[in-house]
Amino acid sequence: MCRTYRTIGSLTALKSHLEESNIREFKSLKEVISFRGAYPTLRQQLIAEHEELIEQEKSILNAHLPQLDLTIETKKHQEEQRLTNEIAQLKQQLTHLTYGDSTNLFQRLQKNLKQWIYKRQVFEKERNFDKKVAKSISELVELSKAKKHRLQFITSQFDTAVEESARSSLWEIDRKKSVIEEASNLIYGALGEQMVVKTLEALPDEYFLINDFAVSFSPAIYDRQENDYIKSVQIDHLLVARSGIFLIETKNWSDKSIANLGLRSPVEQIKRTSFVLFKLLNNEISNHHLGLDKHHWGEKRISIKSLIVLTNTKPKEEFQYVKVLSVGELLGYVKYFKPIFTGVETQRIAEFLLRIADEKTIETK
């Protein structure tokens, strides 16, 4: 099996896009695509779940309200009884004071004062009797009113109650759908790149596949022929083989996308990467850093073959500098070329390119 390094670029970009929107539950591209396909069903399931919740709430209210009313009546009766007993006790004490006369002026004054106090207490308790009873059950009465109002609402406006209950959950699932739709191009790109990776992984382990090869340069590398200062390059896949290096740019494009003049040409993109790789590798060969075996004719040249792989449809035209292939044509094309390097040399080239990819920024002279 082909030795594979680094995550495909579109998948990395998709993961970052989702995490920026605080979406972290998807563990694979398959899960993202499954969510998008199942979205209408998931949304309907959410609504059904909240319909069931509202029905359950309705049943609970219908069961609890009679119990609550009974509790209110019981507590009301207990409070009335308590107040009645207090008034009776005061009246009894007042009755005891009416018996017997005292010749002592101070005792008569004290007795009259107590009578006045008891009469006042009886008067206050009888006057505020209903208020105190009402206060003792006020919280329960308010709770009963709220529950009856809620029951009336969910009975008469069931759909509105379900909508309010599900609002937060529906907002979240709609938000996820929107964020994923914004990343449609990344999803299509990741699907195409995964298809190419899966195809190339069928190659034996003497092949090295480096995904998302992206490097910046400081200062920029100058391409005299194109009069272009190249600050960075990115290519979907580098396949390092005994026959050389294959630069592979994957596009999951439709006929409409291929005809779109607004989309950047992958031919120009791959030409820039090819020029940079040739320059970097040529420098390594000249300085003997790669340790390639000598040939009596001179220094070996590392062949760089530029490919554009279309996973959906491909143009009929042929282009200079690049070979345009379908996924089904890819393995046959790669295997067509004869080996020019040993397994050790191939590994050294792959390790050199991996070091470059890991450095991210290369200091150029």
Image (tube, rainbow, N blue to C red):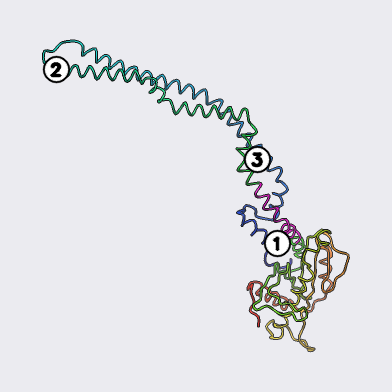
Q: Name the image quarter holding residue 283.
A: bottom right
Q: Are marks 2 and 3 in contact (CB under 8 Å)?
A: no
Kindly report the secondary structure that dominates the magenta region of the rendered protein: helix
Residue 356 x/y as whole percent? 66, 75
Which amino acid does the dot numbered 2 rest on?
Answer: Gln
Residue 106 x/y as whole percent? 13, 18
Q: Earlier in the sequence, mark 2 or mark 1?
A: 1
Q: Which residue is mark 3?
A: 46
Q: Secondary structure at mark 1?
A: helix
Residue 56 x/y as whole percent? 59, 31
- Residue in front for this viewpoint, 111 or 211: 111
Q: Secondary structure at mark 3?
A: helix
Q: Name the image quarter holding residue 165.
A: top right
Q: Are marks 3 and 1 in contact (CB under 8 Å)?
A: no
- Residue in front for this viewpoint, 32 or 365: 365
| Residue 190 belongs to the span the image colors magenta | yes
- Residue in front for this viewpoint, 230 or 310: 230
Which amino acid does the dot numbered 1 rest on?
Answer: Ser
Q: Which image quadrant: the C terminus?
A: bottom right
Q: Which residue is mark 2?
A: 107
Q: Residue at x 42, y 21 (%)?
A: 76
Q: Residue at x 65, y 53 (%)?
A: 26
Q: Which residue is mark 1?
A: 10
Horizontal side of residue 63 vs 49, given as left or right: left
**Magenta residues (range):** 174-192
| 177 vs 329: above or below | above
| 51 vs 278: above or below | above
Q: Distance from label 2 to label 3 (Cα)?
A: 81 Å
Q: Name the image quarter holding residue 12.
A: bottom right
Horizontal side of residue 359 vs 203, given as left or right: left
Q: Earlier in the sequence, mark 2 or mark 3?
A: 3
Q: Secondary structure at mark 2?
A: helix
